[in-house]
Amino acid sequence: MNAPSDRDLILQTRRGESEAFGELVTRYQTGVFNVCYRILHERSEAEDLAQEAFIRAYDRIHSFDIERQFGPWIRRVAANLCLNHLESQKVTTELDDERDADQTQRPESVVEFHERSEQIRMVLASLPANYRLVIELRHYQELSYDEIASELNIPLSDVKSHLFRARKILAEKLHAPD
Amino acid sequence: MHLTDHLTDLQLNEYLDNETAERVQIQAHLSSCDECVARLTTLQELFAEIESLPELALTKSLATPFMRTSSLPAQLPAWLPLTVTLQAAIALVVLIVAAPFVIQLLPDLEIPSLSNIFIQSQTQWETWLGILSQFQIPTLPTFSFELSNLFLIFVLAVVSTLWLVGNGLLLRNQIK
């Protein structure tokens, strides 16, 4: 039997079947959590905000446009929540130590890949919050410049300059000699 | 834009983002400029690195709050069946040990006769009847207006309907 579509699950949720929404959450929770994590760089906060994003989506499910894709929408909701969180908290957090866990048992290529990923995360985390947001929206949510400007409520010229500067910093730090 | 000038970093960024109005001119320049092609390739590699970041796994499911709690009865703790078995075994042993003593004591016990029990019950019953005979039903308050039977039936019907609708709304999620 085919798995129900997102649209079916949304309609079931509207009829009061919260388990259907639970299924939607199961489908998109990792993606949504990673949106939050890439912006916040703190695991427990990212999990809390990802949960909050789903709760908000559940509350607004009756007004959700059924013709839209649920995945991009919920990721956008999560990004906006993180933006509001950053604006209210002005947090500067460090990366979790847990991700630097024991790597000795892994093959060399896996360790190298993991280390490179960690390096990218570290450099992303070091970016100013507004730079992180444009990187998230452009590279991971594939929004156009106009959409990013509208989402963040900033001029188009700021989107271009933030992206340009963020990438310049990333390139300098990632390709800097050790 | 002059084809002889090198492309700026901003132009390369916009080109890769598909956000430039000079796409044709940029492509024409790239077809004849190895230096700009090399810079474009470096930028493409950076984009690929950013986008290749693997997703981290969650430590908990976010779907739990939306899943209905299980209606299965809670599982008994493991120690409880063992305790019950032990109690039953002890009770059996005590019964076997005590049985001879109980048999010895039984003839000495004074058991009231059936007729005495009947007389006592009858006395108790008559006392209750006496109390009940003094009970008076309270009088209902009188209204300054008259309530017709039709009106009362109508009110009863409205209240019953509201009650049914209210329960239906409350239980609509459980009724499938």
Image (spheres, rainbow, N blue to C red):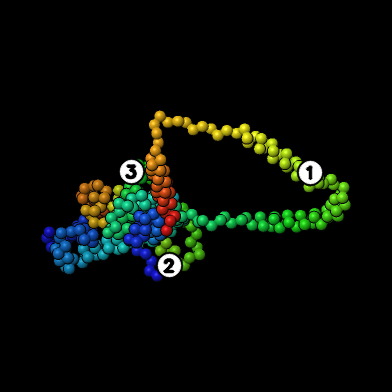
Which quarter of the image is occupied by the C terminus of chain B? bottom left
Q: Nearer the viewer, mark 3 or mark 1?
A: 1
Q: In whole angstroms, how far apart are the C-alphas of marks 2 and 3?
A: 39 Å
Using the rendered image of the protein, determine whether residue A145 is visible from the camera's viewpoint. Answer: yes
Along the line of sight, which residue is nearer the eye, A6 or B98? B98
Q: Secondary structure at mark 1?
A: helix
Residue A87 bears which disc, if any? 3
Along the line of sight, which residue is nearer the eye, B141 or A176? B141
Classed neighbour count for the residue bearing mark 2: other residues with Cα under 10 Å, few (<14), some (14–19), many (≥20): few
Q: Of the residues under marks 2 and 3, which one precedes in the sequence?
A: 3
Q: Position of residue B67 (x, y in %)?
A: 45, 55
Asked if residue B68 lies left or right of residue A40, the reply is right
Q: Secondary structure at mark 2?
A: helix
Q: Nearer the viewer, mark 1 or mark 2?
A: 1
Asked if residue B48 lies left or right of residue B21, the reply is right
Q: In this rendering, is residue A154 above or below B89?
A: above
Task: Identify the amino acid type marked 2.
Answer: Ser
Q: Which residue is mark 2?
A: A109
Q: In whole angstroms, how far apart are the C-alphas of marks 3 and 1?
A: 89 Å
Q: In whole angstroms, how far apart are the C-alphas of marks 1 and 2?
A: 97 Å
Residue B116 bears which disc, if any? 1
Asked if residue A151 lies left or right of residue A1, the reply is left
Q: Position of residue A110 (x, y in %)?
A: 43, 65
Q: Are marks 2 and 3 in contact (CB under 8 Å)?
A: no
Return the chain for callout 3: A
Return the chain for callout 1: B
